[in-house]
Amino acid sequence: ETFPPIPEPLTWAEICQRYPEQQLCLADVEYVDREENEIRTARVIGHGASMDIACEQARLFQDRFDQVTFYATRPWIHLQPLRPQLVLDDELHELCFGPR
């Protein structure tokens, strides 16, 4: 059985440039700051638009790396839950609650 070559280690900036807005499976991760999850270098063993795609690629390396880390190069957007906004003018107030 032939195995794919082990990818070279890349800096986080290189990873972001090569794999923009993708889900990643990383191996041999070296951290600048482990508590902040700030990556110095890593090997990209899977990437794609979804984590399923990235993990499928990473399976080729499952016997070669003890630990795999999951990241994404697309920015995480924390949205406020959408809430309807209603302006309650006199006419609508009367319709909902009766005359004032």
Image (tube, helix red, strand yellow):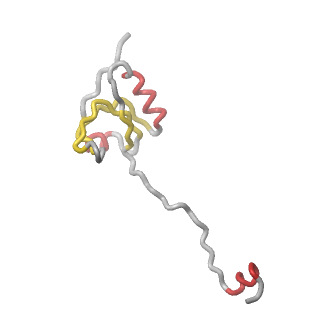
Q: Position of residue 53 (x, y in %)?
A: 46, 32
Vertical side of 96 occupied by 9: above or below: above
**Residue reaching furthest bottom?**
100
Residue drawn where x is 24% and y is 32% of the image: 9
Q: Position of residue 46 (x, y in %)?
A: 38, 31
Q: Could you tell whether 78 is left or right of 36 in the image?
A: right
Q: Nearer the viewer, residue 21 or 25?
A: 25
**Residue reaching furthest front?**
35
Q: Could you tell whether 83 is left or right of 8 in the image?
A: right
Residue drawn where x is 41% and y is 51% of the image: 76
Q: Quadrant of the C terminus?
A: bottom right
Vertical side of 69 occupied by 6: above or below: above
Q: Position of residue 23 (x, y in %)?
A: 41, 39
**Residue reaching furthest top?**
1
* Tag count: 0
Q: Nearer the viewer, residue 36 or 27?
A: 36
Q: Quadrant of the N terminus?
A: top left
Quadrant assignment, res 65: top left
Q: Position of residue 77 (x, y in %)?
A: 43, 55
